[in-house]
Amino acid sequence: MGVIEIIGGVLLILVSLCIIVSVAMQESSKNGMSALGGTSSTDSYFGNNKSRTFNAMLVRFTRILAIVFFVIIVALNIINVFVK
């Protein structure tokens, strides 16, 4: 196992932990009983300004982490194929 593979493995672990934390911190998207009454979550101030809320930032951060995770996995596999 080379140095690059070890560094990549450590990066994968760190990114994985960050993804777990960011997903755990997000709010649930279930409407619950309010969906039965016909009201939606977009009727509130935070629903109208969803792109500016903390939850929206977490969603964006999670998407970026998922892309980084995928890129690291692909890069490690390419390195593993060409180094041997």
Image (cartoon, rainbow, N blue to C red):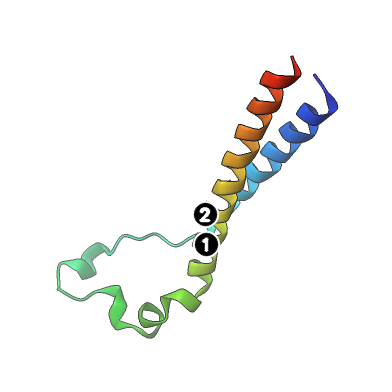
Give, as a three-letter code, the residue at label 2. Answer: Arg
Asked if residue 63 lies left or right of residue 16, the reply is left
Q: Is residue 21 above or below residue 4?
A: below
Q: Quick one: quadrant of the C terminus?
A: top right
Identify the image quadrant of the N terminus. Answer: top right
**Relative to the observer, which residue lies in front, 52 or 31?**
52
Q: Secondary structure at mark 2?
A: helix
- Residue type at tag 1: Arg
Q: Which residue is mark 2?
A: 63
Location of residue 70 in the rendering, given as x and y in whole percent from the top left corner:
57, 40
Q: Position of residue 34 (x, y in %)?
A: 22, 70
- Residue at 41% over, 80% down: 46
C-alpha separation, residue under disc 2 versus residue under disc 1: 5 Å
Residue on which disc 1 sits: 60
Marks 2 and 1 in Cβ contact (< 8 Å): yes
In this rendering, the answer to whether 17 lies above or below 32 is above
The residue at the far front in this view is 82
Q: Nearer the viewer, residue 70 or 56?
A: 70
Q: Decide if residue 78 is on the left or right side of residue 23.
A: right
Q: Residues within 10 Å of mark 2 (few under 14, many from 20)?
A: some
